[in-house]
Image (cartoon, grey):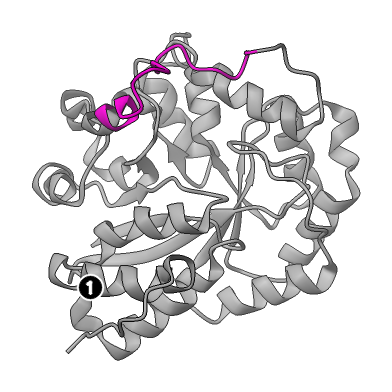
Amino acid sequence: MINYYLPGFLESQRIYRALFWLKDEWPECFYDNVNIKKIYGCFPGMIWNGGSSWFGGGVSRKLVEDTFNFYSTTGVDLQLTFTNPLIEEKHCYDTIGNAVCEIACNYDNIEILVTSPILEDYLRKTYPKLKIDKSIVGTTRDRGTDKDTLESYLADTEKYNMVVFPRKYSKDLDFLNSVPEDKRSCFEILCTDPCSIHCPRLYSHYEDLARQQLLMPCEEGQHECSGFEQGYPFRNFLYRRFQISYDEIVKDYEPLGYTEFKLSGRISYCGAALRVVPYLIKPEYQLDVYQCLLDPFAGLDVDPDFS
């Protein structure tokens, strides 16, 4: 079974409500071997958030409880992306972050992705019930250090509930084949990312987003990626060769025993819809599912047909 970790449990909740309904009513639309196992994300304005920056849209206790209540009925787990790598001790006492964790402790299907050792220690001591996962922001930070070894990542599986492999190993089948078979289900593999695995600023991109989330000043042009040519608008699409398609999962990864796969696409509803459909839905139904999910945005007036 291919287990997917999908983006945006809050901003893309309507996508998942539609997909859950479709799975019940028209299961033949889905690939037979796929499962939505976890959905990750955060709430707007949380300074612990990492991997993206999201401001505004005040968070109420009711919003958090309603969100957690809905997913608790679906059999899907949630991952809170508390992956800001620049957290200092003072940030641990954030009112919203602690309120969300207190509410999360009332549920059995919520985990936390972390990067900052300071925040991780605080969360382990304060909310011991919550499972802790090591995020790709953390493993990207380890790239090129003495922690960037198979032995180190295997040791991480003893400390964390799940570990996300750094991007440079996502298509390195020789490395993946060297992982002991009984440990392969302990690792998430990121399939989609807009940036190249060879980008020299791969970790500093995460730091830039963290500075924004903390309202820290960023230098002019600091967020720009030298890996992209501004004069060539389609260059981004060339990086698809560093991504992993559904067909590649079936051909190369599933036979090796890798079952856990992460798709990026947080914050943008349309981006999430476009990202997840090819990994869940059979090709002959994808256009109709896109129609169903994107109709309010595209203004299309053709009814989807799943018959």
Q: Foreground: 169 or 163?
A: 169
Image quarter in which the N terminus is found: bottom left
When the figure is inspected, residue 5 is found, relative to residue 307, above or below; the finding is above
Q: Quadrant of residue 222?
A: top right
**Left or right for 264, reference 182:** right
Question: Magenta residues?
Answer: 221-238
* Residue positioned 64% across, 22% down in the render: 207
Is 307 contained in the magenta span?
Answer: no
The x and y percentages for residue 32 are: 17, 72
**Left or right for 235, reference 208:** left
Q: Foreground: 72 or 231?
A: 231
The x and y percentages for residue 200 are: 44, 10
When the figure is inspected, residue 141 is found, relative to residue 262, above or below; the finding is above
The x and y percentages for residue 295 are: 41, 73
When the figure is inspected, residue 43 is found, relative to residue 203, above or below; the finding is below
Q: Is residue 75 at all visible to an observer of this figure? A: no
